[in-house]
Image (cartoon, rainbow, N blue to C red):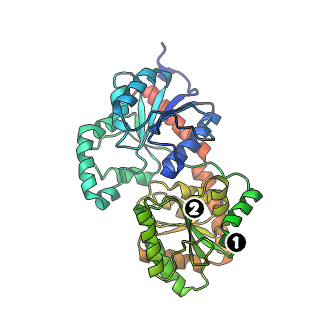
Amino acid sequence: MPNDASLPDRPRRILRVIHTLRREAGGPSESVLRSTSALLDLGHHVEVVTQDPPGTSGPSEGRFPFHPLGRRDDATLGHWLRAHHADFDAVVVHGLWQNAAPVHRALRGTGTPHLVFPHGMLDPWFRRAYPLKHLKKQLYWWRHEAAALEAAAAVCFTCEAERDLARRTFLPYRVHERVVAYGTARPPLPDPAADAALLARFPLLAQGPFLLFLGRIHDKKGVRELITAYAAFRREHPSAPRLVIAGPCATPAEAASLRRLARTVGLGSGEDPMMDTPVLWLPMLEDEQKWTALRACEAFVLLSHQENFGLAVAEALACGRPVLISNKVNIWREITTDGAGIAGSDTIAGGLALLRLWAALSSTERAAMGRAASACFEARFEITRAARDLAAAVGEAVRSRRSF
Protein backbone atom coordinates (compact mmCIF):
# COMPACT_ATOMS: atom_id res chain seq x y z
CA MET A 1 0.00 0.00 0.00
CA PRO A 2 1.51 3.41 -0.95
CA ASN A 3 2.38 5.94 1.74
CA ASP A 4 -0.66 8.17 2.11
CA ALA A 5 1.54 11.23 2.55
CA SER A 6 2.60 10.90 -1.09
CA LEU A 7 -0.98 10.92 -2.38
CA PRO A 8 -3.01 14.02 -3.34
CA ASP A 9 -5.83 14.88 -0.99
CA ARG A 10 -9.08 13.10 -1.77
CA PRO A 11 -12.61 12.70 -0.41
CA ARG A 12 -12.39 11.40 3.14
CA ARG A 13 -14.38 8.81 5.08
CA ILE A 14 -15.12 10.50 8.41
CA LEU A 15 -16.79 9.11 11.52
CA ARG A 16 -18.11 11.70 14.00
CA VAL A 17 -18.77 10.72 17.63
CA ILE A 18 -21.01 12.98 19.75
CA HIS A 19 -23.19 12.52 22.81
CA THR A 20 -26.45 13.36 20.99
CA LEU A 21 -27.81 14.99 17.86
CA ARG A 22 -30.86 16.41 19.65
CA ARG A 23 -30.96 20.11 18.82
CA GLU A 24 -32.10 21.13 22.27
CA ALA A 25 -28.74 19.87 23.54
CA GLY A 26 -27.11 23.00 22.14
CA GLY A 27 -24.64 24.28 19.58
CA PRO A 28 -22.37 21.23 19.05
CA SER A 29 -25.29 19.04 17.91
CA GLU A 30 -26.56 21.72 15.54
CA SER A 31 -23.07 22.34 14.22
CA VAL A 32 -22.43 18.64 13.54
CA LEU A 33 -25.66 18.50 11.53
CA ARG A 34 -24.82 21.61 9.51
CA SER A 35 -21.16 20.83 8.88
CA THR A 36 -21.91 17.20 8.02
CA SER A 37 -24.27 18.38 5.29
CA ALA A 38 -21.52 20.68 3.98
CA LEU A 39 -18.95 17.85 4.06
CA LEU A 40 -21.33 15.65 2.08
CA ASP A 41 -21.79 18.44 -0.47
CA LEU A 42 -17.98 18.54 -0.84
CA GLY A 43 -17.92 14.83 -1.67
CA HIS A 44 -16.84 13.36 1.66
CA HIS A 45 -18.47 10.35 3.31
CA VAL A 46 -19.66 10.95 6.88
CA GLU A 47 -21.31 8.76 9.50
CA VAL A 48 -22.32 9.74 13.04
CA VAL A 49 -22.28 7.68 16.27
CA THR A 50 -24.20 8.95 19.31
CA GLN A 51 -25.36 7.83 22.74
CA ASP A 52 -28.99 8.38 21.78
CA PRO A 53 -31.18 5.35 22.59
CA PRO A 54 -31.02 2.51 20.05
CA GLY A 55 -33.79 2.91 17.51
CA THR A 56 -33.74 6.71 17.71
CA SER A 57 -34.68 8.15 14.34
CA GLY A 58 -32.01 10.09 12.54
CA PRO A 59 -32.44 13.85 12.07
CA SER A 60 -34.87 14.88 9.37
CA GLU A 61 -32.11 16.48 7.30
CA GLY A 62 -29.81 13.51 7.84
CA ARG A 63 -28.29 12.31 4.59
CA PHE A 64 -25.77 10.18 6.43
CA PRO A 65 -25.72 6.84 8.28
CA PHE A 66 -26.66 7.41 11.92
CA HIS A 67 -25.71 4.95 14.67
CA PRO A 68 -27.40 5.56 18.08
CA LEU A 69 -25.60 3.13 20.40
CA GLY A 70 -27.40 3.97 23.63
CA ARG A 71 -26.28 5.29 27.01
CA ARG A 72 -22.60 5.86 27.75
CA ASP A 73 -20.99 2.45 27.71
CA ASP A 74 -17.28 2.25 26.96
CA ALA A 75 -17.55 -1.41 26.02
CA THR A 76 -20.36 -0.82 23.51
CA LEU A 77 -18.62 2.11 21.82
CA GLY A 78 -15.26 0.34 21.90
CA HIS A 79 -16.66 -2.84 20.38
CA TRP A 80 -18.38 -0.87 17.60
CA LEU A 81 -15.21 1.09 16.81
CA ARG A 82 -12.98 -1.98 16.74
CA ALA A 83 -15.42 -3.60 14.33
CA HIS A 84 -15.77 -0.59 12.02
CA HIS A 85 -12.68 1.64 12.34
CA ALA A 86 -11.22 0.36 9.07
CA ASP A 87 -14.24 1.82 7.24
CA PHE A 88 -13.02 5.34 8.05
CA ASP A 89 -9.96 7.48 7.44
CA ALA A 90 -10.36 9.21 10.81
CA VAL A 91 -12.66 9.59 13.80
CA VAL A 92 -13.69 13.07 14.99
CA VAL A 93 -14.82 13.23 18.63
CA HIS A 94 -17.05 16.10 19.78
CA GLY A 95 -16.80 16.94 23.47
CA LEU A 96 -14.85 15.58 26.42
CA TRP A 97 -15.54 13.38 29.46
CA GLN A 98 -17.76 10.89 27.64
CA ASN A 99 -16.24 9.77 24.37
CA ALA A 100 -12.62 10.93 23.97
CA ALA A 101 -11.03 8.32 26.26
CA PRO A 102 -13.11 5.35 25.00
CA VAL A 103 -12.34 6.31 21.39
CA HIS A 104 -8.63 6.56 22.18
CA ARG A 105 -8.58 3.14 23.84
CA ALA A 106 -10.52 1.49 21.01
CA LEU A 107 -8.31 2.96 18.27
CA ARG A 108 -4.97 2.41 19.98
CA GLY A 109 -2.75 0.38 17.68
CA THR A 110 -5.21 0.41 14.77
CA GLY A 111 -3.58 3.19 12.73
CA THR A 112 -6.89 5.09 12.53
CA PRO A 113 -6.29 8.62 13.85
CA HIS A 114 -8.72 10.55 15.99
CA LEU A 115 -9.29 14.30 16.38
CA VAL A 116 -11.05 15.96 19.33
CA PHE A 117 -13.20 19.10 19.52
CA PRO A 118 -13.42 20.18 23.20
CA HIS A 119 -16.30 22.58 22.41
CA GLY A 120 -15.29 24.92 25.22
CA MET A 121 -15.02 22.19 27.87
CA LEU A 122 -11.41 23.20 28.59
CA ASP A 123 -12.41 26.77 29.49
CA PRO A 124 -11.18 27.76 33.00
CA TRP A 125 -14.57 29.35 33.73
CA PHE A 126 -15.91 25.91 34.67
CA ARG A 127 -13.10 25.52 37.22
CA ARG A 128 -14.16 28.77 38.92
CA ALA A 129 -17.89 28.13 38.65
CA TYR A 130 -17.87 24.48 39.76
CA PRO A 131 -14.71 23.86 41.83
CA LEU A 132 -15.77 20.44 43.17
CA LYS A 133 -16.67 19.20 39.69
CA HIS A 134 -13.34 20.51 38.47
CA LEU A 135 -11.49 18.49 41.09
CA LYS A 136 -13.24 15.31 39.96
CA LYS A 137 -12.46 16.15 36.33
CA GLN A 138 -8.81 16.78 37.15
CA LEU A 139 -8.60 13.27 38.62
CA TYR A 140 -10.26 11.86 35.50
CA TRP A 141 -7.87 13.93 33.40
CA TRP A 142 -4.87 12.31 35.09
CA ARG A 143 -6.30 8.84 34.66
CA HIS A 144 -7.82 8.99 31.15
CA GLU A 145 -8.42 12.29 29.37
CA ALA A 146 -4.86 13.63 29.18
CA ALA A 147 -3.68 10.51 27.35
CA ALA A 148 -6.64 10.64 24.95
CA LEU A 149 -5.90 14.25 24.00
CA GLU A 150 -2.15 13.79 23.83
CA ALA A 151 -2.67 10.88 21.44
CA ALA A 152 -5.11 12.82 19.24
CA ALA A 153 -3.89 13.79 15.81
CA ALA A 154 -5.30 17.23 16.62
CA VAL A 155 -7.24 18.93 19.37
CA CYS A 156 -9.41 21.31 17.38
CA PHE A 157 -10.44 24.73 18.65
CA THR A 158 -13.04 26.93 17.00
CA CYS A 159 -11.09 30.16 17.49
CA GLU A 160 -7.82 31.49 18.86
CA ALA A 161 -9.37 32.57 22.15
CA GLU A 162 -10.71 29.09 22.91
CA ARG A 163 -7.26 27.60 22.24
CA ASP A 164 -5.52 30.10 24.52
CA LEU A 165 -7.98 29.59 27.39
CA ALA A 166 -7.68 25.81 27.17
CA ARG A 167 -4.02 25.95 28.19
CA ARG A 168 -4.92 27.19 31.69
CA THR A 169 -7.28 24.52 32.98
CA PHE A 170 -5.82 21.00 33.42
CA LEU A 171 -2.35 19.58 33.98
CA PRO A 172 -0.52 17.96 32.33
CA TYR A 173 -1.47 19.62 29.05
CA ARG A 174 0.37 18.24 26.03
CA VAL A 175 -1.73 18.38 22.89
CA HIS A 176 -1.33 18.99 19.17
CA GLU A 177 -3.41 22.19 18.81
CA ARG A 178 -5.21 23.23 15.67
CA VAL A 179 -7.65 26.10 15.16
CA VAL A 180 -10.35 24.94 12.75
CA ALA A 181 -12.86 27.28 11.14
CA TYR A 182 -16.34 26.91 12.58
CA GLY A 183 -19.72 28.22 11.60
CA THR A 184 -23.17 27.51 10.28
CA ALA A 185 -25.12 27.41 7.05
CA ARG A 186 -26.63 30.45 5.40
CA PRO A 187 -30.26 30.90 6.42
CA PRO A 188 -32.97 29.77 4.02
CA LEU A 189 -34.78 32.36 1.97
CA PRO A 190 -37.53 34.18 3.89
CA ASP A 191 -40.72 32.16 4.10
CA PRO A 192 -43.89 34.29 4.36
CA ALA A 193 -45.84 31.29 5.66
CA ALA A 194 -43.34 30.76 8.49
CA ASP A 195 -43.42 34.48 9.28
CA ALA A 196 -47.20 34.42 9.49
CA ALA A 197 -47.18 31.24 11.61
CA LEU A 198 -44.78 32.72 14.17
CA LEU A 199 -46.72 35.98 14.43
CA ALA A 200 -50.00 34.07 14.77
CA ARG A 201 -48.46 32.03 17.57
CA PHE A 202 -46.86 35.04 19.30
CA PRO A 203 -48.62 38.22 18.05
CA LEU A 204 -46.67 40.49 20.42
CA LEU A 205 -43.64 40.02 18.16
CA ALA A 206 -45.41 42.19 15.59
CA GLN A 207 -45.93 45.04 18.05
CA GLY A 208 -42.74 47.01 17.67
CA PRO A 209 -39.01 46.17 17.67
CA PHE A 210 -37.46 43.66 20.06
CA LEU A 211 -34.09 42.44 21.28
CA LEU A 212 -33.61 38.69 21.11
CA PHE A 213 -31.85 36.13 23.26
CA LEU A 214 -32.15 32.72 21.57
CA GLY A 215 -30.55 29.56 22.93
CA ARG A 216 -30.35 27.18 25.87
CA ILE A 217 -31.22 28.96 29.12
CA HIS A 218 -28.39 27.97 31.45
CA ASP A 219 -26.42 29.64 34.26
CA LYS A 220 -23.48 30.28 31.98
CA LYS A 221 -25.60 32.22 29.46
CA GLY A 222 -25.88 35.28 31.72
CA VAL A 223 -29.67 35.47 31.50
CA ARG A 224 -29.98 36.76 35.08
CA GLU A 225 -27.57 39.58 34.37
CA LEU A 226 -29.37 40.34 31.12
CA ILE A 227 -32.79 40.57 32.79
CA THR A 228 -31.47 42.85 35.54
CA ALA A 229 -29.54 45.06 33.11
CA TYR A 230 -32.55 45.30 30.80
CA ALA A 231 -34.79 46.34 33.69
CA ALA A 232 -32.41 49.20 34.54
CA PHE A 233 -32.25 50.18 30.87
CA ARG A 234 -36.04 50.11 30.62
CA ARG A 235 -36.31 52.50 33.54
CA GLU A 236 -34.09 54.92 31.63
CA HIS A 237 -35.90 54.29 28.33
CA PRO A 238 -39.56 53.38 28.98
CA SER A 239 -40.21 52.94 25.26
CA ALA A 240 -37.22 50.62 24.76
CA PRO A 241 -37.67 47.55 22.54
CA ARG A 242 -39.15 44.50 24.21
CA LEU A 243 -36.74 41.75 25.37
CA VAL A 244 -37.59 38.31 23.95
CA ILE A 245 -36.01 35.26 25.58
CA ALA A 246 -36.49 32.12 23.48
CA GLY A 247 -35.18 28.67 24.29
CA PRO A 248 -35.40 25.61 26.50
CA CYS A 249 -34.56 26.01 30.20
CA ALA A 250 -32.39 23.48 32.03
CA THR A 251 -35.04 22.81 34.70
CA PRO A 252 -38.56 24.02 35.58
CA ALA A 253 -37.13 25.38 38.85
CA GLU A 254 -34.63 27.55 36.95
CA ALA A 255 -37.38 28.82 34.64
CA ALA A 256 -39.53 29.75 37.65
CA SER A 257 -36.58 31.47 39.33
CA LEU A 258 -35.88 33.62 36.28
CA ARG A 259 -39.51 34.63 35.99
CA ARG A 260 -39.55 35.60 39.67
CA LEU A 261 -36.50 37.75 39.00
CA ALA A 262 -38.28 39.43 36.08
CA ARG A 263 -41.25 40.23 38.32
CA THR A 264 -38.99 41.50 41.10
CA VAL A 265 -37.20 43.97 38.82
CA GLY A 266 -40.48 45.27 37.41
CA LEU A 267 -40.68 43.49 34.05
CA GLY A 268 -43.58 41.16 34.77
CA SER A 269 -43.24 37.38 34.54
CA GLY A 270 -44.02 37.16 30.82
CA GLU A 271 -45.45 33.69 31.39
CA ASP A 272 -48.43 34.36 29.16
CA PRO A 273 -47.12 35.00 25.62
CA MET A 274 -50.30 36.98 24.90
CA MET A 275 -49.77 39.38 27.84
CA ASP A 276 -48.11 42.67 26.93
CA THR A 277 -45.05 42.75 29.22
CA PRO A 278 -41.56 44.15 28.58
CA VAL A 279 -40.02 40.66 28.63
CA LEU A 280 -41.53 37.85 26.58
CA TRP A 281 -40.60 34.21 27.16
CA LEU A 282 -40.85 31.85 24.19
CA PRO A 283 -40.12 28.12 23.90
CA MET A 284 -37.35 26.75 21.72
CA LEU A 285 -37.80 27.98 18.15
CA GLU A 286 -36.66 25.66 15.40
CA ASP A 287 -36.14 25.72 11.64
CA GLU A 288 -38.11 28.40 9.80
CA GLN A 289 -39.49 30.03 12.95
CA LYS A 290 -36.00 30.44 14.40
CA TRP A 291 -34.89 32.25 11.26
CA THR A 292 -38.04 34.37 11.27
CA ALA A 293 -37.30 35.51 14.83
CA LEU A 294 -33.67 36.28 14.02
CA ARG A 295 -34.60 38.32 10.95
CA ALA A 296 -37.31 40.20 12.84
CA CYS A 297 -35.25 41.24 15.86
CA GLU A 298 -33.54 44.61 16.13
CA ALA A 299 -30.39 43.04 17.58
CA PHE A 300 -29.27 39.75 19.12
CA VAL A 301 -28.05 39.84 22.73
CA LEU A 302 -25.96 37.32 24.71
CA LEU A 303 -24.20 38.03 28.03
CA SER A 304 -22.60 34.58 28.40
CA HIS A 305 -20.02 34.00 31.10
CA GLN A 306 -18.44 31.33 28.89
CA GLU A 307 -19.00 30.63 25.20
CA ASN A 308 -16.36 28.87 23.14
CA PHE A 309 -18.01 30.01 19.91
CA GLY A 310 -21.72 30.86 20.07
CA LEU A 311 -23.53 29.27 17.14
CA ALA A 312 -26.62 31.44 17.64
CA VAL A 313 -24.35 34.50 17.38
CA ALA A 314 -23.17 33.31 13.96
CA GLU A 315 -26.79 32.65 12.93
CA ALA A 316 -27.75 36.19 13.90
CA LEU A 317 -24.85 37.57 11.86
CA ALA A 318 -25.98 35.43 8.92
CA CYS A 319 -29.35 37.20 9.10
CA GLY A 320 -27.66 40.60 9.07
CA ARG A 321 -28.47 41.28 12.72
CA PRO A 322 -26.00 43.20 14.89
CA VAL A 323 -24.98 41.33 18.04
CA LEU A 324 -24.59 42.71 21.58
CA ILE A 325 -22.38 40.19 23.35
CA SER A 326 -20.11 39.75 26.32
CA ASN A 327 -16.37 39.52 25.92
CA LYS A 328 -16.63 35.95 27.21
CA VAL A 329 -18.04 34.91 23.83
CA ASN A 330 -14.77 33.83 22.30
CA ILE A 331 -15.41 35.29 18.84
CA TRP A 332 -16.07 38.80 20.17
CA ARG A 333 -12.77 40.17 18.83
CA GLU A 334 -13.52 39.05 15.29
CA ILE A 335 -17.01 40.53 15.48
CA THR A 336 -15.99 43.91 16.88
CA THR A 337 -13.04 44.13 14.47
CA ASP A 338 -15.51 43.76 11.61
CA GLY A 339 -17.89 46.32 13.12
CA ALA A 340 -20.65 43.69 13.30
CA GLY A 341 -21.56 44.18 16.95
CA ILE A 342 -20.67 45.55 20.38
CA ALA A 343 -18.93 43.64 23.19
CA GLY A 344 -18.67 44.33 26.92
CA SER A 345 -18.34 42.61 30.26
CA ASP A 346 -20.60 39.73 31.34
CA THR A 347 -22.01 41.68 34.29
CA ILE A 348 -25.15 43.66 34.99
CA ALA A 349 -23.17 46.87 34.48
CA GLY A 350 -21.68 45.47 31.27
CA GLY A 351 -25.11 44.52 29.95
CA LEU A 352 -26.50 47.95 30.76
CA ALA A 353 -23.53 49.57 28.99
CA LEU A 354 -24.16 47.46 25.88
CA LEU A 355 -27.82 48.46 25.77
CA ARG A 356 -26.94 52.13 26.23
CA LEU A 357 -24.39 51.99 23.43
CA TRP A 358 -26.93 50.36 21.14
CA ALA A 359 -29.58 52.97 22.00
CA ALA A 360 -27.10 55.77 21.24
CA LEU A 361 -26.53 54.59 17.66
CA SER A 362 -28.33 56.38 14.86
CA SER A 363 -30.51 54.44 12.41
CA THR A 364 -27.75 54.90 9.81
CA GLU A 365 -25.14 53.45 12.15
CA ARG A 366 -27.38 50.49 13.00
CA ALA A 367 -27.98 49.78 9.33
CA ALA A 368 -24.24 49.87 8.67
CA MET A 369 -23.66 47.46 11.56
CA GLY A 370 -26.26 45.10 10.05
CA ARG A 371 -24.43 45.13 6.71
CA ALA A 372 -21.16 44.50 8.53
CA ALA A 373 -22.80 41.55 10.32
CA SER A 374 -23.64 39.89 7.00
CA ALA A 375 -20.12 40.51 5.68
CA CYS A 376 -18.55 39.16 8.90
CA PHE A 377 -20.57 35.95 8.59
CA GLU A 378 -19.63 35.40 4.96
CA ALA A 379 -15.95 36.05 5.55
CA ARG A 380 -15.49 34.09 8.78
CA PHE A 381 -18.36 31.76 9.72
CA GLU A 382 -20.07 30.39 6.60
CA ILE A 383 -20.25 26.60 6.87
CA THR A 384 -18.55 25.64 3.60
CA ARG A 385 -15.32 27.26 4.76
CA ALA A 386 -15.60 25.41 8.07
CA ALA A 387 -16.22 22.08 6.34
CA ARG A 388 -13.20 22.54 4.07
CA ASP A 389 -11.02 23.35 7.07
CA LEU A 390 -12.23 20.27 8.97
CA ALA A 391 -11.61 18.07 5.92
CA ALA A 392 -8.10 19.54 5.67
CA ALA A 393 -7.47 18.72 9.35
CA VAL A 394 -8.61 15.15 8.73
CA GLY A 395 -6.34 14.94 5.68
CA GLU A 396 -3.37 16.10 7.72
CA ALA A 397 -4.17 13.55 10.43
CA VAL A 398 -4.29 10.74 7.89
CA ARG A 399 -1.02 11.77 6.28
CA SER A 400 0.82 12.21 9.57
CA ARG A 401 -0.78 9.20 11.31
CA ARG A 402 -0.44 10.91 14.70
CA SER A 403 -2.42 8.26 16.49
CA PHE A 404 -0.90 5.95 19.08
First in sequence: mark 1 vs mark 2: 1
Label 1 to label 2, Cα distance in Å? 30 Å
Query: In front here: 206 or 361?
Result: 206
Point out the residue furthest to the right here. Answer: 192
Residue 349, horizontal then vertical, whole percent? 43, 77
Q: Is residue 386 at least partly visible in the picture?
A: yes
Residue at 34% from the left image edge and 59% from the top image edge: 125
Q: Quadrant of the C terminus?
A: top left
Q: Is residue 345 at least partly visible in the picture?
A: no
Residue 247, horizontal then vertical, whole percent? 53, 60
Residue 43, horizontal then vertical, whole percent? 63, 30
Residue 175, horizontal then vertical, whole percent? 34, 40
Left or right for 105, reference 325: left
Residue at 41% from the left image edge and 52% from the top image edge: 162
Residue at 53% from the left image edge and 49% from the top image edge: 23
Amino acid residing under circle 1: Ala
Front tag of 1 and 2: 1
Q: Secondary structure at mark 2?
A: loop
Task: Please say if 393 is above or below 179.
Answer: above
Amino acid residing under circle 2: Asp
| Residue identified by numbered label 1 | 206
Label of residue 338 in the image: 2
Label of residue 301 in the image: none
